[in-house]
Image (cartoon, rainbow, N blue to C red):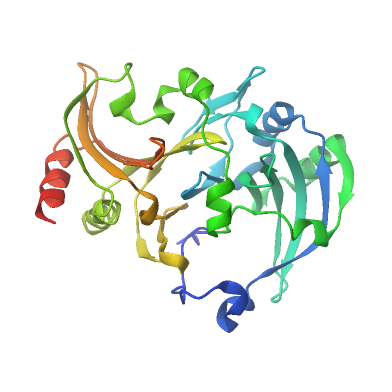
Amino acid sequence: MKKDPLSSKKKNCGSVPEQCPCCKSTQLEVERACELQPQFNEILGDLSKLGLLLCFARNRSCSIGVAGCVPDLLTDKTSSAGCNYDMNLHLNTPAWQYAYSVHERNSNGGSFIGMEFFDKNHNGLFRIALTPDSEVQEFQNITRNYYRRPVSAEEIGTWRRMAELTPLNEANHTPISESFIQKDSWSAPLVSSERQETNDEMGFSGHLPLCRTALAEALNDNAELVLTVAGGFGRVCTTFAPKVLEDAQRGWLFAGGDGRMLRFNPCAVATYWIGKHETPKESYSYLEAVDCFGDLILRITSYNPDSHRNWQALASAF
C-alpha cells in the first residue's frame, strides 16, 4: 500500500509542541527561504507543472490538506479557479499579500520544500509542499522566475504559519470577503445563499460534537464525503474518506486518510446547520459549521440523501 503522506501515524500528546520532548524532535529547521514577487495568479498558474503536491489551506478555525495535483487555473484580476479529480479550488488572491519559497529540514534529515502564501498580517493562507513525485526542476524555475529577496530564519520566526493553532492566529486571520462570496456562493453557508435550494434544514448548538459524529460515522461505514473549507484564502472542496480520527493539541480535532487531512477547532462553532439539497439533477445532505461571524468554517457533504435524517437524529439525541 502506498504511504499516505497526510495520515497521522502517532497519537498527538496534546502538549504545546515547543515544550514537548516527543514533538520537539520532529520540528523543522529553516535552511533557506526567499520572498517571491506578489504575482499570485501567475505563480498559481505555474503550480500545475509541479505534479503531485501536498496542498494546504486554512481559515480562522480549520485547516485542510490534500495530496494531489493542482488543477489548471483560470485567472482574472480577482481570483484563480479550477478543478480536477483531486480538488476544486477558487482562490481569493486579492486577500494575499506575501509569497515565499521555504526549504526546511528535520532532525532526521528529511526535507520539506514548498511555497507559502500569507495575508497582510503574515497569517498563513495557502501552502504547497513538494513530494518525492514532484517536478523539482519546475519548482526551481518558478522560484527563479519570481525571486524578490532572501529571507532570514529570524524573520520567518515572526510569521503565523499554516500549522499554528494559537488563539492569536485565529483572532488576526483574514476573514472571507463579501465580494468573494458574491463570486462563489459555495464559500458561504447554504442557509444564507439565495442561489442554493435547501430543504428540511435545522440548526443546532455549536457546543454539540456534530462534526466529530459525522466523521466517525463515515469512518465506521467506510463512506466517502466531500469537504468544503472557505476563508480569506478562498475556497477548496475535496473528497474525503476518513481513516483516522483523534484529538490534536489545544482541543482541535484531527481527521485523516486517503491523501487528505483535516484539522478543525470545534470550540469556534457557533451553530451547526443540517439539511439537504435537492434538484432534478442531484441530491445530497450537508452539515455546516458556522462561526460567530456567520462565516462558514466547514461543510461536510454526503451524497447519501438520507444522511441528513441520521445527522439530525443524532443531534437531537444529545
Number of labelled discs? 0
Q: For residue 264, what is the image quadrant?
A: bottom left
What percent of the width, then of the height, locates residue 185? 41, 22
**Residue pictured at 24% horizontal, 23% vertical:** 282
Residue 258 seen in this snapshot: yes
Residue farthest toward the bottom in the current orientation of the protein:
21
What percent of the width, then of the height, locates residue 129? 65, 51
**Please, is residue 36 above or below residue 180 in the view?**
below
Q: For residue 295, what is the image quadrant?
A: top left
**Residue pictured at 66% horizontal, 40% vertical:** 119
Q: Is residue 233 left or right of residue 122?
A: left
Residue 55 seen in this snapshot: no
Q: For residue 148, what is the image quadrant?
A: top right
Q: Quadrant of the N terminus?
A: bottom left
What percent of the width, then of the height, locates residue 166? 55, 60
Q: Quadrant of the C terminus?
A: bottom left
**Please, is residue 265 above or below residue 235 in the view?**
below
Q: Is residue 184 left or right of residue 81?
A: left
Q: Which is more toward the observer, 16 or 21?
A: 16
Q: Is residue 302 left or right of residue 35?
A: left
**Residue pictured at 72% horizontal, 36% vertical:** 97
**Residue pictured at 71% horizontal, 46% vertical:** 115
What percent of the width, then of the height, locates residue 26? 63, 73
**Please, is residue 120 above or below residue 134 in the view?**
above
